[in-house]
């Protein structure tokens, strides 16, 4: 085995330095260098003895690149229509969110299309995998399982058996004999991923990798890991809620603007064909502090319930808490409500919750959050069958948002009859049966949204 030397690798961008540095000169991040053992290149390790030859792009054939279909429609949507031969897909998510369950389901379903599927586990024994698979339904005979952590042994097994699809769970448990460091270290994760990438491209076998995430939610290991693979997927959701969102952060074979919605059940992850209806199924009617907004998750509009509760703060220091909402965004909307609309919130604790474990990332949900807070503070319920779409500016103005026609069409499809939005919206964008209520400011929008004081019915909290 060749001798190794100690180097330092930036855990953010993968830059290698012979000595430790406080700040990475490439990405500018602080305290990201990790000491690791770096093996020198092995003579003869090149995959080709001859130099590569340039070709005309028009002469390159696309035959044999047809995708393998997946009967799990939400997974197929996120991947761009199926699994591409020779692709390397990395899927990450919090512990217990359902990564292994989802990929075991994919492995079972792909057995109907491919001659065999190999599931490699470095964390569970084959008996544990068998018990989990038995809960997900019938187990096909062409599904093979291997409990191994040596990347060399795994590569030899793949080359001998030639499976149609390989799943490796997880990349952090794999190790290469050519690197003198523990499994999960920066150099091990990088080298094992590179070995699997060369194997996938050389054999045409698609490989799925499970990746651990850090406490910030990013894939653990060097940032270069995400640059090596073809597709990066994140399975998001609170393990205490039943809904899961599969989102593409990178996809060389499709769009990153798609999202798949699943529901965690005893039989595994089931597709949610109409997520908006599922998220609003338990919403009570005529409840103070409850408002419906319309989000865009990729190219799909989702209707979501936003709940707010205001309560007098006896301590003199009011609290602001947001579940599924950025804390700074909540502070901004609270300040606009107090300064521009005149809603007295200085002595009120404010709690905002997004139902279903979703997270509000886009500004189009500002109006729904602000109306929910104003509803709770005034004790007036939001008018029935009304959705709210709009971004709130610091001057209290209501701004337009993209994809308004899709949002309005989804709202009308679910039976909503009123939509409050900015004045820049065109009447032609509203589908039949949906009244477009336009407002220039947040104060005007709240006036259109809340019932009259004498009509307020049920107050919760």
Image: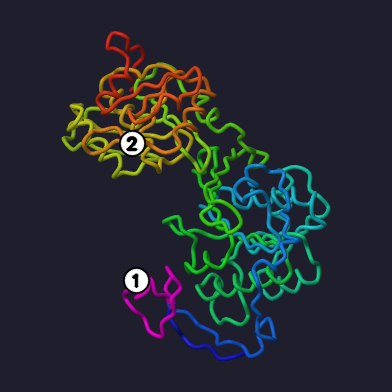
In the displayed image of the protein, which residue is found farthest to the top? 454
Query: Toward which corner of the image does residue 426 lie, by quadrant?
Result: top left
Q: Is residue 19 magenta?
A: yes
Residue in the foreground of this view, choosing between 393 and 379: 393
Q: Position of residue 308 (x, y in %)?
A: 34, 29
61 or 131: nearer the viewer? 61
Residue located 62% across and 77% down the image: 176
Task: Give the numbered dot on residue 31.
Answer: 1
Q: Quadrant of residue 178?
A: bottom right
Task: State left or right for residue 349 relative to residue 244.
Answer: left
* Quadrant the C terminus occupies: top left
Classify mark 1: residues with Cα within 10 Å, few (<14), some (14-19) or many (20+). some
Say which residue appears at 34% left-offset and 44% top-offset.
Answer: 326
Q: Residue 291, position in %: x, y?
A: 39, 26
Q: How far across and down, in percent of the image, does residue 353 sit?
A: 38, 34
* Numbered disc 1: secondary structure: loop
The stretch of residues the image draws in magenta is 9-34
Question: Alpha-carbon distance for marks 1 and 2?
Answer: 37 Å
**Which label belongs to residue 391?**
2
Residue shown at 71% from the left, 70% from the top:
154
Can you tell which of label 1 and label 2 is closer to the viewer? 2
Quadrant of the frame with the N terminus: bottom right
Q: Is residue 399 above or below residue 257?
A: above
Asked if labels 2 and 1 touch by Cβ distance under 8 angstroms, the answer is no
Q: Nearer the viewer, residue 326 or 113?
A: 113
Q: Say if 50 sits above or below 70 in the image.
A: below
The kind of secondary structure the magenta stretch mainly shows is loop
Q: Earlier in the sequence, mark 1 or mark 2?
A: 1
Q: Is 244 a magenta residue?
A: no
> Does residue 245 appear to the left or right of 69 in the view shown?
left
């Amino acid at each position: 085995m060749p001798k190794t030397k100690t180097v330092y690798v930036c855990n953010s961008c993968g830059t290698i330095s012979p000595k430790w540095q406080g700040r990475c000169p490439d990405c500018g991040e602080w305290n990201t260098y990790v000491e690791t053992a770096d093996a020198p290149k092995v003579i003869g390790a090149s995959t080709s003895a001859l130099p590569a030859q340039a070709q005309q792009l028009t002469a390159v054939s696309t035959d044999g690149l047809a995708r393998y279909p997946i009967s799990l429609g939400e997974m197929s949507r996120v991947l761009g229509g199926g699994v591409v031969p020779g692709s390397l897909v990395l899927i990450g998510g919090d512990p217990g969110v359902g990564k292994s369950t989802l990929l075991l389901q994919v492995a079972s379903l792909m057995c109907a299309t491919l001659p065999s599927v190999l599931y490699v586990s470095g964390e569970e024994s084959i008996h544990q995998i068998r018990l989990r698979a038995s809960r997900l339904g019938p187990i096909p005979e062409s599904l093979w399982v291997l409990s191994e952590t040596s990347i060399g042994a795994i590569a030899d097994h793949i080359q001998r058996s030639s499976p149609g699809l390989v799943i490796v769970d997880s990349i952090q448990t794999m190790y290469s004999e050519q690197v003198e460091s523990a499994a999960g270290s920066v150099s091990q994760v990088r080298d094992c991923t590179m070995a699997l990438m060369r194997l996938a491209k050389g054999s045409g076998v698609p490989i799925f990798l499970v990746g651990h995430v850090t406490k910030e939610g990013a894939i653990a290991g060097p940032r270069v890991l995400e640059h090596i693979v073809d597709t990066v997927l994140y399975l998001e959701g609170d393990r205490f809620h039943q809904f899961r969102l599969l989102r593409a952060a990178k996809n060389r074979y499709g769009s990153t603007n798609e999202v798949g919605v699943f529901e965690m059940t005893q039989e595994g992850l089931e597709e949610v064909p109409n997520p908006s209806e599922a998220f609003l199924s338990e919403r009570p009617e005529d409840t103070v502090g409850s408002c419906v907004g319309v989000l865009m998750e990729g190219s799909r509009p989702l209707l979501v319930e936003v709940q707010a509760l205001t309560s007098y703060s006896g301590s003199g220091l009011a609290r602001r808490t947001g579940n599924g909402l950025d804390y700074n965004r909540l502070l901004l909307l609270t300040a606009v409500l107090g300064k521009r609309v005149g809603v007295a919130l200085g002595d009120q604790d404010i709690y905002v919750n997004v139902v279903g474990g979703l997270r509000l990332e886009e500004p189009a949900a500002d109006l729904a959050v602000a109306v929910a807070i104003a509803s709770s503070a005034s004790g007036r319920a939001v008018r029935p069958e009304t959705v709210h779409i709009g971004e709130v500016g610091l001057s209290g103005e209501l701004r337009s948002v993209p994809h308004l026609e899709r949002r309005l069409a989804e709202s009308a499809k679910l039976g909503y009859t009123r939509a409050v939005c900015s004045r820049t919206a065109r009447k032609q964008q509203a589908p039949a049966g949906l009244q477009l209520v336009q407002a220039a400011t947040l104060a005007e929008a709240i006036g259109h949204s809340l019932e009259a004081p004498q009509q307020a019915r049920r107050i919760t909290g």
